[in-house]
Image (cartoon, grey):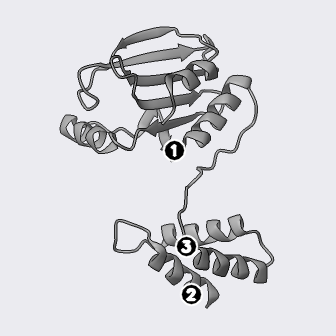
């Protein structure tokens, strides 16, 4: 998870607000710091962390220029966060008005986006998805991508789009499903 140091470096040590975190999902020592650049069409960032252990629970990046909001929740606390949102009857999706949070999967993805937002640079709005696949399956995918004259990343995107368009009746997308997707694409 992102560290307090990484967050502070990303926002150039500019903190504009701070308060106790209002929900209990992260425990009684949860505190939130905000950094806003002062521009209505600018950006802001938030971090929720434990004042005793310094563990980071959640970070948010708000890009008002492009109307995008990104969030990374510590995997150890994501279930508690969802449970409290449900108990409160609150959607945790909406960041502001008609803008929903995009939940990110990796620290590097959040840092890349946040650093680009602060610098006012263009950035990739897609979400990095970490994959842990067996070597044999990766090799098969590389061969399939080569036969189609596309990159492995493009091939993986193709498989993911198919999986999203036709979801399976399961909570996890394991290697068996990758193989099934490969077979469907081949047909």
Question: Is disc 1 surrounded by few (<14), some (14 to 19) or many (20+) residues within 10 Å?
Answer: some
Say above or below: 89 vs 45. Answer: below
Q: As rendered, which of 64 and 149 lies closer to the eye?
A: 149
Task: Please name the residue that numbered disc 2 is placed on.
Answer: 183
Which SS class for mark 2? helix
Task: Please name the residue that numbered disc 3 is placed on.
Answer: 134
Q: Residue placed farthest to the right in the image?
A: 149
Which SS class for mark 1? loop
Single out the mark in the foreground, 2 or 3. 3
Q: Residue at x 81, y 77 (%)?
A: 149
Task: Please name the residue that numbered disc 1 is placed on.
Answer: 104
Q: CA distance from mark 3 to mark 1?
A: 23 Å
N-term mark: 1 or 2: 1
Place residue 37 in its image quadrant.
top right
**In the picture provided, is 103 more to the left or to the right than 28?**
right
N-term mark: 2 or 3: 3
Say above or below: 155 vs 77. Answer: below
Residue 30 appears at what percent x and percent y?
A: 32, 21
Q: CA distance from mark 1 to mark 2?
A: 29 Å
Place residue 182 in its image quadrant.
bottom right
Q: Residue at x 23, y 21 (%)?
A: 28
Q: As rendered, which of 142 and 68 lies closer to the eye?
A: 142
Q: Residue at x 71, y 69 (%)?
A: 152
Residue 65 appears at what percent x and percent y?
A: 66, 28
Say above or below: 130 vs 9. Answer: below
N-term mark: 3 or 1: 1
**In the picture provided, is 158 more to the left or to the right than 166?**
right
């Amino acid at each position: 998870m992102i560290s307090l140091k990484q967050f502070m470096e990303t926002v150039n040590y500019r903190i504009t607000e701070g308060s106790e975190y209002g929900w209990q999902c992260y425990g009684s020592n949860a505190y939130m710091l905000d950094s806003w650049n002062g521009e209505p069409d600018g950006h802001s960032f938030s971090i929720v962390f434990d004042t005793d252990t310094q563990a980071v629970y959640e970070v948010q990046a708000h890009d008002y220029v492009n109307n995008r909001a990104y969030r990374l929740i510590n995997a150890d606390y994501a279930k508690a966060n969802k449970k409290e949102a449900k108990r409160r009857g609150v959607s945790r999706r909406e960041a502001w008005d008609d803008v929903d949070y995009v939940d990110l999967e990796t620290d590097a993805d959040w840092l890349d986006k946040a650093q680009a937002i602060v610098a006012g640079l263009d950035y990739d709005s897609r979400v990095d998805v970490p994959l842990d696949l067996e070597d044999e399956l990766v090799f098969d995918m590389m061969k399939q991508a080569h036969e189609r004259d596309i990159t492995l990343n493009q091939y993986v995107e193709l498989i993911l789009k198919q999986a999203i368009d036709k979801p399976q009746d399961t909570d996890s997308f394991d290697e068996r499903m990758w193989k099934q997707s490969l077979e469907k694409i081949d047909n």
